[in-house]
Amino acid sequence: MDTVNNDHQRNGSNKEHDDSTEWDLSKSLPKLPVPSLQSTLNKYLTVMKPVLSPPLFAKMSYIVDQFRQDGGEGEVLQNYLLKVYEETDNWANKWWLDDMYLKIRLPLPVNSNPGIIFPKQRFTNQRQQIRYASQLVCGVLDYKSMIDSHTLPVDRVSYKEKGQPMCMRQHYDMFTSYRAPGVVKDVQMKGLGNRGHDVITVLCKNQMFAMEVTSNSATASYEKIYQQLELITKLADVDAGNAPSIGVLTSQSRDRWAESRITLQKDPSNRESLELIEQSIFILCLDDGTVPRYESSKKLDDTALALHMLHGQGTNVNTCNRWFDATMQFVVAANGSCGMNYEHSVAEGIAVVQMVDHALRYVESTQTEKSPPVSNGLEFSIPRKLTWNISTNTLKAIDVAIPNIDKIIDDLDMSVLHFEYFGREFPKSQGMSPDSFIQLALQLTYYKIHGTLVSTYESASIRRFRYGRVDNIRANSPLALEWAKAMIGEAEITDEEKFSLLQKALRWQMDNLTETILGQGIDCHLLGLKESAFELGQPVPELFTHESYKIANHFKLSTSQVPTSRKDFFVCYGPVVPDGYGVCYNPGRDNILACVTSFNSCDDTDSNFFSFTLESSLLQMRELCLKGALPASPPPSS
């Protein structure tokens, strides 16, 4: 996901702050630098001290000192990294992509794929559902047309070296990429498409239909799309309840799904159906409603909407009406619950949110039209239902997949916090970074509940570099720990002293943020050093086999800021470890929305309690800031 560090501007969208004329777009972006070995190791020690026991930290310090010696393991691996830097466009990308996504064997829903929640719609009949879905498809295709014509404005950096172009690779890969399951490691397929005959896959009542949306590079009109979607719903009704739940196989562990896919590919009809899905530019899911127990008489709550987009709410509801490998999977449900589920390996949240924002604005601009646009007269193939020849082994795999994904869904605990007391403008008024302010609130919240700090992940954009994706900002600093202890009364100090500690912790966090987005983060560097040992055929250094490294990469607090244009349009995702939290937050001008997730199977975590405590932490911090801004009281008169 993305943080405030990705807060960027489009070319020419902000004249006051846009100094894009200083940048030559014909030149390649700079390469991601390789940080110095000593700097990374020093930062590594700093962020690990608050989360390790004193004996474990002492052992880690000794290992680091051995690793950093002149002529030692660290120097050899660093020199190899510098060689890789010279020979590649981005030395970190392949290792990062494998480590973060392609080698992870967990199922994609909840564990990897985020959900995006669109503003709630009100449909009174199926025709309105199809109308909205048609407008949404048109909006997405309108965005794709800018990509195809290379007219999509270049994103620009808005913090440090303002106006610098950002890498646009994620935008250009969204419609042409697919994550195929593999045994041991997945494959990221790129360059997909049908050369002027784009197809989307529509899922309806657990059935799949290939629907042409571009013919000879001309895009279908709203009327054509509506007609095709209407036909699909009628065709789906014929076999409703009888279609095999093929889509649920994509919810399995990657190894299991890879084996099932190999079995399916042995049949020519199945192989053709799989190819059509994998070549699709995106997926559209026409869903039923949400689970009734989540509904009130008038509206759905945000938790129900988020769960619907994150996993479909169970195989007895909409989870079988999904294809989780697809990069983009839009959902339009009969009860007005709308959004998307996307596969994360291709793009970060900010790129996907930009596309969604464009599509939603397109929909809103066309909803007032009294009649649909006139057909453009082009001929489009009628939707084609995908057929499957199901073997006994595949039926068994489906029978295993259904309870497996339902167990994951039942285990997920989600809470959506709407914090209405203040938003990003308050920390700004105090001369503080809103993102760093919220990160410290999360550290305080975790400490209040668990009495310790833990390894924290906050994604930081490195898109100012060639093919850059993200590195990690770790908020678990010694200064954050000292301040958190003071805030709960473990240190007897005044409010002025607490405020001073807060300011120090914020400055550290902001400095860490700045260094990371400028290519001096530690996580990609440490991963590169470890992978370099493998490539050189050397034993993996103890630095990466010691317990401290496992703790460093066990992110009990996985966080991201993903800003959106409105508070009824937001993002959520699951925890990345069984005993952790996932926190996706969006600070508005005068409010903060946070989606908190954890697992019910962990007795130590509770999403609602975390949300409640986060709210109290934010209020406590505001009170402290207001006290700290007051002039000191005069000494009492004698």
Image (cartoon, rainbow, N blue to C red):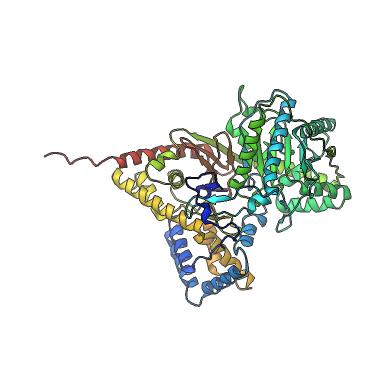
Q: Quadrant of residue 533?
A: bottom right
Q: Is residue 361 above or below residue 504?
A: above
* Residue at far left of view: 638
Q: Quadrant of residue 358?
A: top right
* Residue at far front of view: 21
Residue 556: in sight, yes or no? no
Q: Quadrant of residue 213?
A: top right
Query: Going by the image, does 350 lie left or right of 319?
Result: left
Quarter of the image containing the C terminus?
top left
Residue at left offset 55%, top offset 73%:
79
Most foreground residue, 62 or 462? 462
Task: Name the spot of residue 153 as percent of width and height, x first.
Answer: 61, 48
Task: Name the spot of residue 322 as percent of width and height, x first.
Answer: 73, 41
Residue at left offset 53%, top offset 64%:
33
Q: Is residue 273 above or below residue 123?
A: below
Most foreground residue, 341 or 242? 341
Query: Going by the image, does 132 lie left or right of 593?
Result: right
Task: Name the spot of residue 395 as percent of width and height, x first.
Answer: 82, 44
Task: Report the label total.
Answer: 0
Most foreground residue, 359 or 400? 359
Most foreground residue, 340 or 6? 6
Q: Is residue 629 above or below residue 172?
A: above
Residue 209: in sight, yes or no? yes
Task: Name the spot of residue 308 as percent of width and height, x first.
Answer: 65, 36
Q: Is residue 331 above or below residue 466?
A: above
